[in-house]
Image: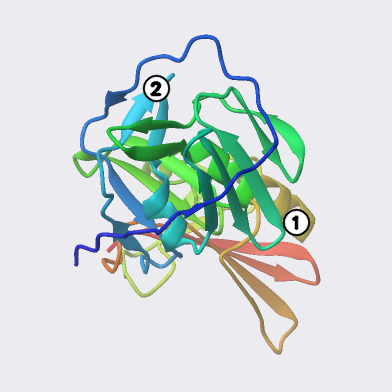
Amino acid sequence: MKKHIVLALLVIMMPWGLERSEAVDAATPAPLVRVIAGGGEGYGQYIHTSGPIYVTNQRLLIPLADLSERFQYHVTWDQEHGQMQIQQGRQVIQIQIGAAEAKHNGNPVAVEAPARTIEGVTYVPLRLIHESLGKYVYYLPEFNGEPTVWITDRPLLQEKDVLSLDDDPNFERLPDDPTECQRRLLPQGKTPRQIQLGATMADVRQAYGTPYKMETAENEQTRWEYHSFFLPHSGYAWVYEFTFTQDQLTQLCVSLPH
């Protein structure tokens, strides 16, 4: 269901200053980009932005208002000086329109694609959200026929992790039952990120980040799940399930999209 998100921006004055970039590359509207936000297992949702997504320096710019309400950011806006402050919990970002530098919790950070106002709409780079507010951003220029960007709380499996599984000699192919494991890591196999049986939880976390789901069974086994890019409420996602026994990886099963 289409949902147009509106954010009321408070007008304040902020005395801090940031050096503006001397030259700001022109931003151009990108092809229609599908934005998906939310959790794994395909239970995210589409975000219908209030304006077109723009691209500059090969980076996507997206309306600030849409993302702010979706992720419950608090935004204050000094329209006269082109300055804004974005806060989520203890994380605070200060941005100036056109500036090549922002401040994250008071510390300067580089901005590859500066924020800007286009036809009255304030746009911010997705990378800034990822690095400063703890979100994960994954972009595919073509996914099911459309450019798509995911904004999630946990890292997603990437194309390199899943698209070659059918021909990957490191994995055993099992019967295609959508309710069961369909690919299994072989005893001497390695994942595309060089994880093999016997790896520790720390090894897997370093390679794949924080799992989407963690469960501990009565038999002292622990299971971690990682999910790929997905379509909301469709079941279209790859799932890695790592099984550990006393901190050692004993099995990796992969479920395929259905």
Residue density around tag 2, few if under 14, some if 14–19, many if 20 or more, within 10 Å: some
> Is residue 212 shown above or below 98?
below
Q: Nearer the viewer, residue 182 or 216?
A: 216
Mark 2, residue position: 56
Mark 1, residue position: 198
Residue shown at 75%/56% (left/top)? Answer: 198
Query: Element type at marker 1?
Result: loop
Residue shown at 79%/66% (left/top)? Answer: 247
Q: Earlier in the sequence, mark 2 or mark 1?
A: 2
Residue density around tag 1, few if under 14, some if 14–19, many if 20 or more, within 10 Å: some
Which quadrant of the view contains residue 164? top left
If the image is split into quadrants, where does the C terminus sit?
bottom left
Three-letter amino acid code of the residue under disc 1: Gly
Which quadrant of the view contains residue 62? top left
Q: Is residue 47 left or right of residue 70?
A: left
Q: Nearer the viewer, residue 111 or 98?
A: 98
Residue shown at 22%/40% (left/top)? Answer: 146
Q: Nearer the viewer, residue 164 or 117?
A: 117
Residue 110 visible in the current orientation: yes
